[in-house]
Image (tube, coloured by chain):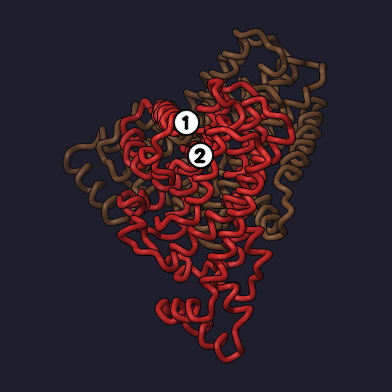
Chain colours: A red, B brown
Amino acid sequence: MLDLAQLDRPMAARLARELEEVKIIFERQLASELSAVNGLCVHIEQYRGKMLRPTLVLLSGLSVLGDEPLTPAHRTVAAVTEMIHMATLVHDDVLDEAEVRRRGATVNHLWGNETAVMLGDYLISNAFHLCSTIGDPAINLALGEVTNTLCEGELAQLHHRDDFGLDEATYLEIIRRKTASLIGACCQLGAQLAGAPTATTAALGRVGIALGIAFQIQDDLLDLLGNEAVVGKTLGLDLSKGKLTLPVIAHLSEASPAQRATTLRALETGDATTVRTALRDSGAVAYAQTAARRFVDDARAELTTLPASPGRVLFDSLAMSVVARDR
Amino acid sequence: MLDLAQLDRPMAARLARELEEVKIIFERQLASELSAVNGLCVHIEQYRGKMLRPTLVLLSGLSVLGDEPLTPAHRTVAAVTEMIHMATLVHDDVLDEAEVRRRGATVNHLWGNETAVMLGDYLISNAFHLCSTIGDPAINLALGEVTNTLCEGELAQLHHRDDFGLDEATYLEIIRRKTASLIGACCQLGAQLAGAPTATTAALGRVGIALGIAFQIQDDLLDLLGNEAVVGKTLGLDLSKGKLTLPVIAHLSEASPAQRATTLRALETGDATTVRTALRDSGAVAYAQTAARRFVDDARAELTTLPASPGRVLFDSLAMSVVARDR
């Protein structure tokens, strides 16, 4: 996500050091007495790419704390959020029948769906177990609520598969649950653990929600238009799995009856080239890009309500990178 | 499991009333704002059959408390354990490609694997969320440990699929993790929440582990030899999915080289009739039945270390029913 090595600032260096600690907690938590389980965990560690969620937990904490040190709970919650995210990746790959993730073979592709389902469960279970080690019931409750919401979002998305009448508001509600709820919780908990006042905690929660929505729209755009070699995972899955995304929804709602019929036929027959051309030519791709940028603008505006600090500057760079990325 | 209506005793009536409360907590927890999610939850409520795990939480509490009332946490933990169990059923059905569960169609059969994976995740998430409402970090930690162990058992079982050299000790370790760990935790937590002394809590934990192992051996025997109409779910899956169980392991380790070769060929070609006959004729089925009974005997012997009470009497009936059941 953020190329910390490119940001030659003390705050970026501090964040990079903290992320190394998070990785150690993550790996220690997943270590099992059973070698069969450890082999799987070593494999999925290559999926750990952007570390967006732990970065946001730490950055929210740093934005509030300034020069004060983060708490051990920050690092634990950061590892927990990455573990929850990793579980959704492993289960999403089963759902999507994906073969490649982060340039490596997916668990389902290598060891079958059964192992992928169980490994995802192992990750979810360990996330809750790790979270419980903090000993604060409020954090467990908050994360339990978030994962409930996340699963509801996934179930709603499956329910609306091949629903070509899906409207933008329902789509946004689905991705708010599926993606933005966890990212919002990362920002909120990072601030809360730093002892931030309620107003700041709520503001950072809103920053996370807006960034999460923008992140998902950008992810959907990459799945539609990205370069598989650059993104490093199987693409085009949304179209092939009947998952409607913002450019498709915007296009279908604005198209002439004739154009709509042509695109629907292309969607139903799996003619991705025709769909892509229609979405580009009708301005639907640009519409989705603008929508993503607007959510980032909202997040950045909300950030300006916090006191100026090196943490806030770094947070602002990260916000911009959400829509600037090509992988 | 226990036919409480047949047990005309005040303690059985009390247990039945408490179980009704647990069902209400269970349903209230799963209620979602999204109708698509609620439809799925209503469907899986028919899977709630024996209620073995909540029964054990309550019964362990009652064995310790006598006439004193159970705590609200007993009912919550009881619902949590059933929710964890239900999640494993939904995901197991994906693993097994099962079509029938409790006389109804499985989620994967009706709505596809994707929805079954996500619904299982929703159940796991809600189990942890519900557990967190108790506000006692020790319970969250204990249940997180148990679900880690449970997933490790499932992963180890998948790892040993089609491993015809699997030995009895490894099999017992797998089912201890996969099945007995949760059942042991039910008994232990039921006692702990009742304020039992450490020795009693540990004894009830051991009762649960022994019953859990016996329960799984009996389940495996039913999958091998049961009547699908009586059991109410797809049977014969262990053989078709290469899951080795105690009768098969005992048979292969004791058979003559010629008999072993014949059985291995039948296992590899999926000739279930030949396998069943070989396991019955060689005494391997009887061996597994005896093993299950021995674990029940261990549990019952451990129960006699508790003070005599109506709860203990009921617990003893339940222990016997674990191997007496045909569904």
Residue A1 in the image, given as x and y percentages of width and height: 43, 46
Instruction: Please determine if labels 2 and 1 lie on a single subunit.
Output: yes
The mark total stands at 2
Percent from the top left, x then y, of residue B23? 74, 41
Q: Name the residue carrying label 2.
A: A314
Image position of A220 with respect to A132: above or below: below
Q: Mark 2 lies on which chain?
A: A
**Residue B184 at least partly seen:** no
Q: Are marks 2 and 1 in contact (CB under 8 Å)?
A: yes
Kind of residue indicated by mark 1: Met
* Foreground residue among B241 and B249: B241
Q: Which residue is drawn at 60% across and 41% down?
A: B125
Q: In which quarter of the image is residue A214?
A: bottom right
Question: Which quadrant is the C terminus of chain A positioned in?
Answer: bottom left
Q: Mark 1 points at which residue?
A: A11
Tell me the number on the disc at residue A1: none
Q: Does the rendering let one see residue A156?
A: yes
